[in-house]
Image (cartoon, rainbow, N blue to C red):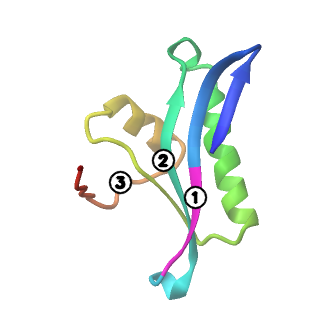
């Protein structure tokens, strides 16, 4: 988990996991989840810096792919990720207890 703080205030977070896989020849993949940036800092570049850091970290660790999870209803987030080069590719499902 990456946490961004300004002064003593929490302003940004995300979770970055590295997962060995069976697809892509058993390649390691990075999974980005739970991206949050304080509303007052949206559009400031903080989110872009966090995601760019995650991508570079994934490359350094030898990942073949970076995937991220986002809710279907978060249209603004989808535009943000597309500007960073991400492409919608899968339809996910979940089971909540």
Element assignment for label 1: strand
Residue at image mark 1: 17
Residue at image mark 3: 88
**Viewer-proximal residue, 45 or 20?**
20
Provide the major secondary structure of the magenta segment.
strand
How far apart are labels 3 and 2 at the CA level?
15 Å
Point out the tag, 2 or 1, that comes first from the N-terminus. 1
Q: Residue at x 70, y 46 (%)?
A: 53
How far apart are labels 2 and 1 at the CA level?
8 Å
User: If the image is split into quadrants, where does the N terminus sit?
Assistant: top right
Whether 34 is among the magenta residues is no
Q: Residue at x 59, y 16 (%)?
A: 41
Element assignment for label 2: strand
Q: Position of residue 94 (x, y in %)?
A: 25, 55
Q: Position of residue 24 (x, y in %)?
A: 49, 82
Q: For the residues carrying marks 1 and 3, which lies nearer the camera in this image?
A: 1
Q: Quadrant of residue 95?
A: bottom left
In the shown orientation, is residue 77 left or right of residue 56? left
Residue at image mark 2: 33
Point out the tag, 1 or 3, that comes first from the N-terminus. 1
Q: Residue at x 76, y 64 (%)?
A: 60
Point out the tag, 3 or 2, that comes first from the N-terminus. 2
Q: For the residues carrying marks 3 and 2, which lies nearer the camera in this image?
A: 2
Callout 1: few (<14), some (14-19), or many (20+) C-alpha neighbours within 10 Å? some
Residue segment shown in magenta:
16-21
Q: Eyeballing the image, is 89 above or below 70?
A: below
Whether 17 is among the magenta residues is yes
Outermost residue, front direction? 97
How far apart are labels 1 and 3 at the CA level?
19 Å
Discs 2, 1 touching: Cβ within 8 Å: yes
Callout 2: few (<14), some (14-19), or many (20+) C-alpha neighbours within 10 Å? some
**Viewer-proximal residue, 84 or 50?**
50
């Amino acid at each position: 988990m990456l946490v961004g703080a300004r002064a003593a205030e929490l302003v940004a977070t995300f979770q970055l996991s590295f997962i060995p896989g069976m697809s892509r020849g058993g390649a390691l993949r990075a999974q980005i989840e739970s991206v949050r940036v304080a509303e007052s800092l949206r559009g400031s570049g903080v989110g872009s810096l966090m995601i760019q850091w995650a991508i570079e970290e994934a490359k350094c660790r030898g990942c073949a792919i970076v995937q991220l999870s986002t809710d279907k209803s978060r249209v603004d987030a989808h535009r943000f990720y597309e500007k960073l080069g991400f492409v919608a590719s899968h339809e996910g499902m979940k089971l909540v207890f």
